[in-house]
Every structure is written in C-alpha cells, then in structure tokens.
Image (cartoon, helix red, strand yellow):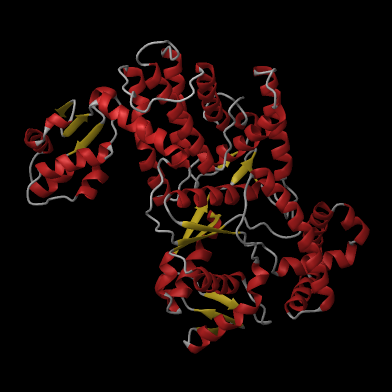
Amino acid sequence: MNTKELVALEIKNALEDNLLSINEIEDYLEHPKRDDLGDISFPTFVLSKILHKNPKDIAEELAKKINVDKFEKVEVVGPYINFFIKKTEFASNVLHNVLTEKNNYGDNTIGKDQNVTIDMSSPNIAKPMSMGHLRSTVIGNALANIFAKNGFNPIKINHLGDWGTQFGKLIQAYKLWGSEEEVKCDPINTLLKYYVKFHKEAEKDESLNDKARAWFTKLEDGDEEATRLWKWFSSESLKEFKSIYDELGVTFDHYTGESFYNDKMPEIIDILNNKGLLKESRGVKIVDLDKYNLNPAVIQKSDGSSLYITRDLATALYRKREYNFVQSLYVVGSEQRNHFDQLKAVLKEMGFEWANDIHYIPFGLITLNGQKLSTRAGRVVLLKDVISDSVNLALEQIKQKNPSLQNKEEVAHSVGVGAIIFHDLKNEKINQFDFDLKEVVHFEGDTGPYVQYAHARAESILRKSNCKEIDLNNLSLNDINSWDIIKQLNRFPEIIVKAMNEYEPSVIAKYSLNLARSFNKYYGNTKILVEDDYLNARLALVKSVSIVLKESLRLLGVEAPNEM
C-alpha cells in the first residue's frame, strides 16, 4: 500500500455517511512542498461544501477520528490535515519493492493488454527530416513506452506523407529541372531543392500549380510514369528516414503511409452517400458540421481528387477494424486542431461511436532563433545534422570531464542523442520552445545529461563499494537526508499513471530531474561508503535511485550510460 492509499483509507474510515470514495480522497491528497508540513496533506475545503462548515473546524474534528498509530504523527494546520509517515518501516518497504521489482517497478495492468494505436513522426517523402519532425517522433515514442508500462499494447504507426498534391509538384519540378544522375548522387537534398524551386517559380507562374495538380491526378489514376517516379522518390526517402530513426533509437510497428489508404477511400464516400451526409457546395463535396460549430469538411475536390480528411477517415476506419483499439492517438502539431475536430465529427455523423476513442495529442513548435522552420521557404535545420553536432558537443565535454573513459564515442552518442530527446520532452508538449544546442547538451541544469550523470554517479558508487549483493532484510535507514529520495521513489508508480492519463511525457522528465537533484544533494551531504550498520541500506538507496532513473530515461527514449 502506498502513502496515498494509506492516508486515503484512514480518512475514509473517519468520514461518516460515505461522503467521499477512496479514489476521490486520493485525488484531493497533496504532497506538501516543505518537510515540516508532513508527507501527505488532505485539504478539507471540499468537505466544507458538503458539510457547510468551516474547513478549519472540519480538519480539527476529522483529525480526532483518525488512527494516528499508523503514522509518525498527524497535525492540523488551518484547513489541512498533515500526515507524517513512519520513516524507517516505510523506507524499508519502498527500497524492498524497487530492488525486487527492478526495472519492472511501477508496472501495472491498467491496460489489460488492449491496443492503443499511435500515429507519430509522419515525415513527407522526398523531403529531409528536419528538426520540425523531432517532436512528433519522440513524444509518440515516449507515449508508447508509457502506455506499455501501464499494461497497454501500443502500436506505433509511421503515417508517411507519401501522397497528395505535393507529389504532383515534385514530379512537375523533376520534369522541368530534374536530372536522374543528380538525384542518384544526393536524393533527398536534390529533391528538396526541386521542391523549393517549384514554390518560388509558382509564385511567378500560376500555371505550374495546374500542371502539378494534373500530375497528381495521373498518379491517383495509376499512370505508369507518375507511379514510377513516386516509387523511386519514396524508396530513397525511406532509406534516409530509417537511418535517422536508428540514431534516435526509435522503431515502428508499421510504415503505412497515406498511399496505403488510397483504395480504401471509395468505401468512405459510399458510406457518406448512403447516409445522406455528402452534399454539393460550390463544386466540391462536403459534410455539413454546423451542429459541431465547425466549418464544413471538404471530402472531395471538383476534379474528384481526395483530400487529407478523406484519407484520414479511411485510415481511422481501417485501424479500428485491424487493431480494435481502445484509444487511437494522433501526435500532430497544434495547428491541426481543426482538422482533427472535423475528423471526429464526421466519424460521429457516420455512426461510429468509437470516434470518442480518438485523441488528438497536439504539440507546440520548435523555433530556431525565434523563427518557424519551413521547408517551402528553404529554412530547414536537418535533424541528422543536429544529432551529429550534439554528439560531437557531448564528446568534447566527456573528454574534458573524464579523459580516461574507455568508450567515449559510444557514451557521447548516448548523451548527445539523449540530450536532444530529453530537452524536447521536459517541456510540456503544448508549449513552443526555442532550440539552442549548447544549452541542451550541458551536464548541469535541467538537462538530460544531468540526469544521465546522476545515474552514472550512482553506478560508480556501487562499483566502488565492491558490494556483490544487497541484503534485502537489512534496509532500515535512520538519516533524514534519505527521506526526500524515499518519498520520490515511492511516487514513481503514481507518476507513470499520471503521465499516461495526461498524455504528458514531461511528467516523467520533470520527475527524473527532481530525483537526480535529490540524489546529488544526498551524495553531497552523506558519507555513503562508511563501514557501519547502515551501509547496506545506503547502498540499497543508491541502487534504487539508479534503477528508477534508468527506467525513467528509458520511458522517455533516452539511454543511461553506467559511466560518463
């Protein structure tokens, strides 16, 4: 039983008439910011609305009914009942749990092995992966790890942008200015150059857009030349994408891009027609969404070609049939909110109640020097270049801090890549942030390398101790310095559930920073390797911190080197 459960049960027993359930009480419990205010607090404001009494009076009356024998002490401060946990016994239980469960500490079975599809990353074919693709990739990957930790079966899907009018533009650009030899030498950068040139030229010559649309129509109709070029562009792009995913340590269960759903759209049109939902408006076919306070969803253009929402409707229906998901997550930039509102609304109009299980997971932009990254404008920061620069910067710092480290290059890769991922995930996903590499790859401050270094320090202490095995029957700690760490270790399972419920990896990133800070403070104030009766328990604490830091980083998609 964790601290919240223990406190909630005692409050529940002290309350009359089933005023609140155990779960409701747990939701109201707080972790005080100061040690002198206890370990868990219950604010009685909520009861004042029910009992029509002063919260302070309620706190005093309720405290008298609580079995204080289960706690070190229970105090009333204003409208709060503050609970102080019995430290020695509690610390022993927490350490025992972490050390026996190891990396499975915090696992639960909430998900009952049900499927959760995660639409993530989704770069566009024939364009390089830029920093703009980082967020969807690492947020989606972290959410997959978090949902798996909570007992779900996550299915990571890379919905590649391999269809649409941009391919008409690219084919037209290649026909006008392209060279097969040039593309073969440097596929992605050459195709990007053609794409950027097309947009600049189209500003002067509107007819280029018409020609591009005509090429895409040919592609949809299976034209041999259009299909050959599209397959060539796609295969060259996928090779580069996979090399970058390898660098990031990200894998996918499926690479099913937009083209996969091309033959599944007619069924969507049929369903909409049969239900009388499809209407003509100014030459295009729409679904009216007035009742949802949304603009009409344009399903088909006047030339009969499809749009993103048509393909996304087919995608959603396919995924429900194929995976029978209990949740379907779309990790996509915040500017797409209207699109996903329309998607869910149209699915509901089609009679699919499972549309409520679709969750749009928006995130803010990464900017560079305050400017939005843009492929069309040619303002691109390539992700592979950022990874390379970050690894090199990490290597420089490692050479300075630990010149005798054996595997410097391997550790530098873990630190450099981890720094980029952690910096992204420590920010609440909806927030926009400006990227500064020197700030990101720093061994001090709120960074991934800081957490990695805390883990490596813990492992270093364990190596120096020469301890072969920790005695699980001797885990009693008597020092106040360890208490903050014990409380944080105990909260880890709760943090895992919170991160899942809020679809927020930053909950775990911030937790790991706090645990790393507490451990570094403990390390600075405690002689850990002194030979006395408490050495085993102190090593148990260090090992537990190492386990939980490593697992926290793993959930975020970050490696935890044992030496740095």
Quadrant of the rendering where the C terminus is positioned: top right
**Number of numbered discs:** 0
Q: Residue 205 in the image: x percent, y percent?
A: 81, 66
Q: Residue 189 in the image: x percent, y percent?
A: 81, 52
Residue 445 relative to residue 104: left or right: right
Q: Residue at x 76, y 55 (%)?
A: 239
Quadrant of the rendering where the N terminus is positioned: top left
Q: In this view, does 75 lie above or below 168?
A: above
Residue 532 relative to residue 234: left or right: left
Residue 18 relative to residue 28: left or right: left
Q: Residue 449 in the image: x percent, y percent?
A: 58, 29
Q: Which residue is drawn at 11% across and 49% down?
A: 50
Q: Is residue 537 above or below residue 430?
A: above
| Quarter occupied by residue 534 | top left
Q: 504 or 142, which lies in front?
A: 142
Q: In this view, does 538 lie above or below 29?
A: above
Q: 139 or 487, which lies in front?
A: 487
Q: 283 or 110, which lies in front?
A: 110
Q: 426 or 346, which lies in front?
A: 426
Q: Is residue 132 above or below residue 122?
A: above
Q: Which residue is drawn at 65% across and 79% down?
A: 263
Residue 79 relative to residue 267: left or right: left
| Quarter occupied by residue 69 | top left
Q: Can residue 231 be seen in this view?
A: yes
